[in-house]
Each structure stands twice: as structure tokens, then as C-alpha cells.
């Protein structure tokens, strides 16, 4: 009997939905990707249409499968990875959402978060969930929907409405409404989940006004959750294929990068930047504004990670392209940055939606300093790229302090990691080697691996580390004095960006 040799990863991101078919060696067989619109109802508010999330994901899955030339019988399993914290509430019976998905970047609940902090529940939240009070997480977004959509709270109290992050929404729909679940890594980003006991916390649900009947069942990251339901348009051929793995995108990328030992770290240069360090079976509480989350849970063993987030990384390149028109494509940014010898004294702090770790300032806003008449668009583009590297350095400095571990190398992935200019500057500023893998689809591969583990395609997490290959390693070339001077100027610029927006 020939072993089923393929897994499909669904990678549902902030700006696009992708599906990738992998073989047993971790190689990409086929891929499909579809962008979908961002909705900005007010400044600082970000939404997605739940139908767009589901529709583009089904379209990508259908097309990636068709392009692969693989028979459905040879697909061992499907794994899911997703943008985290993004919040959906829908009718348990009809499956109809009561409101748009509120995206992780959305700041609409900032004032409520201030109120929670003032009430002194911060220490309890941190102790139970490993998180800080912030509008980033799902809990306050659920509450906003219940408070602001007419009739929603009453329907939720009657048990008619359910909540899910994007993984839950996809799995619920793909299984024909049979499975309302969420894996521990996604649960740990809601501000409602006890990460040591791996269950929902009743007190936090009460404080945030979220009925527990709405919440998905928490499950490990690798297990058979359900099967693709028959009758889903476009997926008829895949009916009956099991969904066997799920993890939030950053946890999946940590695994996909082979960071399976404590002290190993990766950074994903996506819309935001996400730096994670594996802390093993210890859920370390940070002293410098990092978050503690579940990375994955396999065979009864839970692995934790310290995490720092840069809210706007790749999005600052998109901003240069789409809103300011300084570049026509993201690919132009590197060569343009390299066309000038340095940043000309310009620093760009991309705090468009506030600053994440280690600053945690919801009221910071994007700031550009050091402009002179000699400033060119090349200097501004260079400053945007450098700004990404500085923010990652700030995170890793704090992480080393928290974990008591010295990072030996940073593994990198995500869209902007293809920029040799940015990776070299990152190595210079961080003073560490930067290791870029041959196969950059590490987030999707992490999800595929979790699914394949459950389906018996692989037997142990150590196998993923063996499958990973480096494409290029960047080593520091800038002298220490220059690197420290640049970073010092950056920290001055960050101070200018802080507390710009007035609290409501």
C-alpha cells in the first residue's frame, strides 16, 4: 500500500489567502494565492469581509490542488495557518456573520483597553494569558461586536452566536459547520485563555463580557479535527480529506523554520514583523513587554514562545508604493535604498497603528524626522527599510534579557526577507548572522508539517529541522561604532513618535 505522500497548507493571511501543496520532502508542488480587499471604515479601524476570507481561501485550495496534478487519494491531510487575533462572530445555525471580521491591526477598542488597565486587571491578564492589555487581541473585539451590533449580545446570551479566529471560521465552514474548534496557539492570542492550564478563563470572560458558550473548543495543534464536507463548491474532489493541523501564522513559522529547541528564534517580515523565540516547556513571563504564547502542542507536550511584534513592517513598503507613490513595486525599494550611501540622517518610524513591543504605545503615530532640502526619495525609502531592522533589534535585545538566552543566529522569512539590502542591514544592526532559508514558505510548511505529523507522514518534530536548508547567511559587516550611532539616532526618533494621538 503506497503511503499518501502530500499535504496541503491553507495560509490565510491579512492581505491574501494562499494554498500550497507540499510533498514529503517539504518541497512545494503547487501554489495558488488570491488577494482580497482591506476595509477601513474610520482612521485606525481595519475590517475584512468574512465571505472574502472564506471565498479566496476555497478558491486558492481548489486551484492549488488542480495545479498539483495529485490525486485526492494521495492527499494525507490539510493544515491551516492564519492571521491571528482577527475576530469573527457568526450565527451557529445559519453560519451568517453578524459583522465584518475585525482585523488584528484594528485599534477601535483602545479606549476600553485603557479602562481595563485603569481597573487594575493587567497583572491578572498577564499571569493567566501571557499577554498585555491591548486592542490587538481578540477579547475586546468580541465585546465590541456584542455591544455595537443591534441584538448581538442578546443572541449571544441565548447561545445563538459563536466566535472564532480565522482558523475557527475556516474549519467550521470546511467541515460543513460540524467543528467549532481552535488550536491552543490561536486560543492563546484572545486574552481569554489560560496558557498554563490550556483552557478558557471564566473570570476573564466575565470581565470582558464574553459568554463562554460562544467560544470554540481548544484543541492541540496536530490532531484530526474533521473532514472536508461534501458539497462545497469547488472542493467536491477533496470531500473527505481530513483537516489535521492548525496553528497561528507566527507559531507555524517558528516550527517551519525548524526552531524546535529552546533559545532558537525566527523573524517573519510580513505586513507586520513577528519575532518568536522558542522557550521550551516554560511559559516565560516577560519583564520588557514581550508576549508569551503557546507555540504548539503535540502528543501532550506544549511548547511556548516569547513574542514581540512590529505592527507595521512590510506595510510601510506598501505605504510608500500605494499611498505615497514613491515606488511602483515593492521590489524597487532595495535597489533605490542602495542608490544612496546612507539614510542622509532620515529616520522613519512606521507607527501607523501605534507601536508594539517593547514600547506598547497605542497612541504613537508614524513619524519621519531628519528631513533636509537634500533629502531624496531614495533616502526616505532607505529609512523605511532601515526602520524595520531597528524595530527587530529592539525586540531581540529585550527577548535575550527576558529569556536569559543569547541568540546565536536569527532565522528569517516573509515577503521582505527577499531584500538582500534589508537582511544585510539587519545583520549589521543586530550584530548576529541572519539565516534565510531556501524555501521561504515557512509559515505554510509549519502548518503542513503539523497536519502531516498527525496523518503519519512524519513522525517527530526533529524531522522538520532536518528538512530546512539555508539559502544565504548574512554576517555583520558594518563597524560597531557606526551601528551603535545609527541605533541611538533611531531611539531618538521613536521618542518623537510616541503619544502623538490624544487618548479619547
Image (cartoon, rainbow, N blue to C red):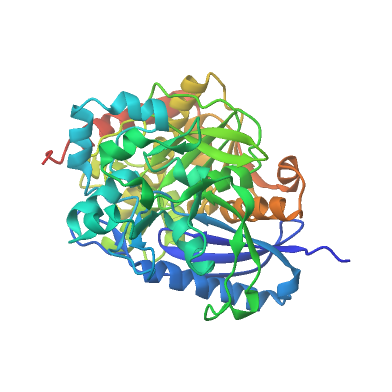
Q: Is residue 270 visible?
A: yes
- Asked which quadrant contains residue 231, the reply is bottom right
> Can residue 268 be seen in the rendering of this structure?
no
Image coords of residue 427 (percent x, y): 53, 36
Horizontally, residue 251 falls left or right of residue 131, namely right
**View extreme (right): residue:** 1
Residue depicted at x 60% and y 28%: 281
- Compared with 295, 327 (above or below) is below
* Residue 61 on image: x %, y %: 57, 71
* Circle count: 0
Q: Is residue 498 left or right of residue 350?
A: left
Residue 15 x, y percent position in the rendering: 41, 62
Image location (x, y in percent) of residue 42: 18, 58
Q: Judge whether 452 appears above or below 463 on screen.
A: below
Extreme-front residue of the structure:
158
* Between 485 and 303, the one nearer to me in the picture: 303
* Res 150 quadrant in image: bottom left
The residue drawn where x is 24% and y is 30% is 495
The image quadrant that residue 115 belongs to is top left
Q: Quadrant of the C terminus?
A: top left
User: Image check: 54 left or right of 175?
Assistant: left
Q: Residue at x 75, y 43 (%)?
A: 460
Q: Residue at x 53, y 65 (%)?
A: 18
Quadrant of the image containing the N terminus: bottom right
Amino acid at each position: 500500500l503506497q503511503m499518501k505522500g502530500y499535504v496541503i497548507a491553507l495560509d490565510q493571511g491579512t492581505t491574501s489567502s494562499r494554498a500550497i501543496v507540499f510533498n514529503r520532502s517539504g518541497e512545494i508542488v503547487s501554489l495558488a494565492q488570491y488577494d482580497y480587499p482591506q476595509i477601513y471604515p474610520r482612521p485606525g479601524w481595519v475590517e475584512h469581509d468574512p465571505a472574502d476570507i472564506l471565498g479566496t481561501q476555497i478558491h486558492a485550495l481548489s486551484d492549488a490542488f488542480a495545479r498539483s496534478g495529485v490525486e485526492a487519494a494521495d492527499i494525507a491531510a490539510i493544515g491551516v495557518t492564519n492571521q491571528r487575533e482577527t475576530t469573527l462572530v457568526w450565527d451557529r445555525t445559519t453560519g451568517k456573520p453578524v459583522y465584518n471580521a475585525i482585523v488584528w491591526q484594528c485599534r477601535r477598542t483602545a479606549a476600553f483597553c485603557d479602562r481595563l488597565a485603569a481597573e487594575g486587571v493587567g497583572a491578572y491578564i498577564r499571569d493567566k494569558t501571557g499577554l498585555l492589555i491591548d486592542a490587538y487581541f481578540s477579547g475586546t473585539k468580541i465585546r465590541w461586536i456584542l455591544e455595537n451590533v443591534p441584538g448581538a449580545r442578546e443572541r449571544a446570551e441565548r447561545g445563538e452566536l459563536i466566535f472564532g479566529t480565522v482558523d475557527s471560521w475556516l474549519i467550521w465552514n470546511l467541515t460543513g459547520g460540524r467543528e467549532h474548534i481552535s488550536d491552543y496557539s490561536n486560543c492563546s492570542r484572545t486574552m481569554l485563555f489560560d496558557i498554563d492550564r490550556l483552557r478558557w478563563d471564566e473570570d476573564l470572560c466575565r470581565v470582558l463580557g464574553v459568554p463562554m458558550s460562544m467560544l470554540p473548543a481548544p484543541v492541540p495543534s496536530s490532531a484530526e479535527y474533521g473532514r472536508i464536507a461534501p458539497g462545497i463548491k469547488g472542493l467536491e474532489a477533496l470531500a473527505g480529506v481530513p483537516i489535521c493541523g492548525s496553528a497561528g501564522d507566527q507559531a507555524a513559522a517558528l516550527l517551519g523554520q525548524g526552531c524546535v529547541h529552546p533559545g532558537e528564534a525566527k523573524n517573519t517580515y510580513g505586513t507586520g514583523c513577528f519575532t518568536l523565540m522558542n522557550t521550551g516547556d516554560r511559559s516565560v513571563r516577560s519583564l520588557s513587554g514581550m508576549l508569551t504564547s503557546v507555540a504548539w502542542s503535540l502528543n501532550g507536550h506544549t511548547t511556548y514562545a516569547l513574542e514581540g511584534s512590529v505592527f507595521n513592517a512590510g506595510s510601510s513598503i506598501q505605504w510608500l508604493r500605494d499611498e505615497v507613490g514613491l515606488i511602483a513595486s515593492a521590489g524597487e525599494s532595495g535597489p533605490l535604498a542602495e542608490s544612496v550611501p546612507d539614510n542622509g540622517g532620515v529616520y522613519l518610524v512606521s507607527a501607523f497603528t501605534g507601536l508594539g513591543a517593547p514600547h506598547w504605545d497605542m497612541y504613537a503615530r508614524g513619524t519621519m524626522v531628519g528631513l533636509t532640502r537634500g533629502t531624496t526619495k531614495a533616502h526616505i525609502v532607505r529609512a523605511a527599510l532601515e526602520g524595520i531592522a531597528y524595530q527587530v533589534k529592539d525586540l531581540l535585545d529585550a527577548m535575550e534579557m527576558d529569556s536569559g538566552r543569547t541568540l546565536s543566529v536569527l532565522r528569517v522569512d516573509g515577503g521582505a526577507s527577499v531584500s538582500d539590502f534589508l537582511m544585510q542591514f539587519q545583520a549589521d544592526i543586530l550584530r548576529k548572522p541572519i539565516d534565510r532559508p531556501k524555501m521561504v514558505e515557512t509559515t505554510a510548511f509549519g502548518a503542513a508539517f503539523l497536519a502531516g505529523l498527525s496523518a503519519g507522514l512524519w513522525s517527530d518534530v526533529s524531522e522538520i529541522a532536518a528538512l530546512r536548508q539555508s539559502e544565504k547567511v548574512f554576517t555583520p559587516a558594518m563597524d560597531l561604532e557606526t551601528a551603535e550611532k545609527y541605533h541611538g539616532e533611531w531611539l531618538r526618533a521613536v521618542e518623537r513618535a510616541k503619544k502623538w494621538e490624544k487618548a479619547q
